[in-house]
Image: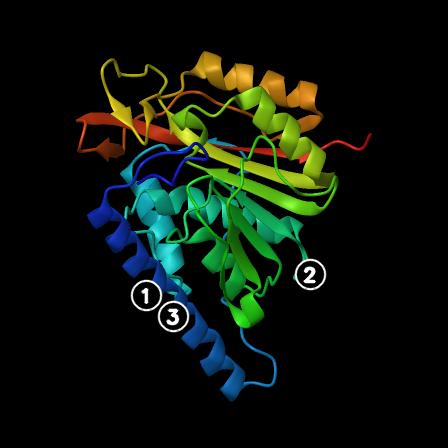
Amino acid sequence: MRATSVLRTGTAPLRGVAKLGLEQVLWTRAALTVRRNSRVLSTPAVPSALPKVAPTAVLQDDADWRDAVDEARKRGLPLHRDLPKNWDTVGAAATVLSRVGPTGRVLDAGAARYSTLLIWLYLYGLRDLVGINLEFRRPVHHGHDGCVAFEPGDATATRFEAGSFDAVTCLSVIEHGVPIPDFLAEAARILRPGGVLVISTDYDAAPPDTSGHTAYGAPVHIFSPVEIEELIKHADKAGFDLDGSFSPDHPGRPVHWKRIGLRFTFVRITFTRRAT
């Protein structure tokens, strides 16, 4: 379910092998798709447009994530192996694609090389994509001419120049101990004015007790409505405007983290970098 944290965390050898295998399968499939389309068409085809989504939303129930899975399947997009995660991937991809043209530059903060967001953006024609994570030991490139770069990096203190990105995404990462004010300040620094920031995280209107649970080197955390409102306030101070509105309620708890026996949901929040 989770994208790898921007914090340094240990990975068991067998799990690391499985992730590497999944990474190779997904990127090989993406390369073959682009190559096949290039042979058939003078201009490579891209999937049909993703449905319009609310920029800021809470995953309401099973029907929500099942609809997202169906939309991805219709377009031939590779699915995230944890199916509810396709809800925030569809939302993030749709938001970025509606705001960023094919020459846009996108950073995925806390990226995993086996996750699907950057693959989807690549299949939609974007060719300047970067994913960073402190777990990465060395740079790795995928896609045409290595245009999708994965490299070691801390999302709270990147190497990138100010205003050098059109979009920053951060999916299922901040719940793993990320210093939120620091991350938001850095995202504001590297985004151009008008750039978009999309964050998703574990959430519940009445979070279950997570005491004693750890994952990826940090205590398990599920955000509450008060904490999301605090995040929005921190974003405002960093120079962001909230896109849409945050409505805390949800009728179901469609996310089940089996390993620790918890049920909750997801929230996706979108911001626009204000001009300064």
- In the image: residue 84, left or right of residue 161: left
Residue kind at label 3, given as amino acid type: Thr
Q: Which residue bears the numbered disc 3?
A: 28
Quadrant occupied by the C terminus: top right
Q: Which residue of the protein is positioned furthest toward the right in this rendering?
A: 276
With respect to residue 144, does 228 lie above or below? above
Q: Are marks 3 and 1 in contact (CB under 8 Å)?
A: yes
Residue at left offset 65%, top offset 26%:
185
Task: For mark 1, give the secondary structure.
Answer: helix
Percent position of residue 180, x then y: 53, 22
Q: Residue 131: give x, y in percent of width and height.
A: 52, 49
In space, the residues marked 3 and 2 are separated at their CA atoms by 23 Å
> Can residue 252 be seen in this snapshot?
no
Number of the front mark, 3 or 2: 3
| Residue holding disc 1 | 25
Answer whether labels 1 and 2 touch (C-beta < 8 Å). Answer: no
For the point 58% across and 64% down, the residue is 147
- Residue 139 image position (x, y, % from top left): 50, 54
Closer-to-camera residue (140/260): 140
The numbered mark at residue 54 is: none
Q: Quadrant of residue 201?
A: top left
Tags 3 and 2 in contact by the CB under 8 Å rule? no
Residue 92 percent across, percent down from the top left: 51, 45
The crowding category of the residue bearing disc 2, from other C-alpha atoms within 10 Å (few below 14, some 14 to 19, many at least 20), is few
- Please state which of the two labelled residues, at mark 1 or mark 2, is closer to the viewer: 1
Q: Earlier in the sequence, mark 1 or mark 2?
A: 1
Q: Quadrant of residue 25?
A: bottom left
**Dot 2 amino acid type:** Thr
**Considering the numbered disc 2 on the image, is that residue within a helix, a strand or a loop?**
loop
Q: Which label's residue is closer to the chain start, 3 or 2?
A: 3
Q: Amino acid at mark 1?
A: Val
Q: Which residue is mark 2?
A: 103
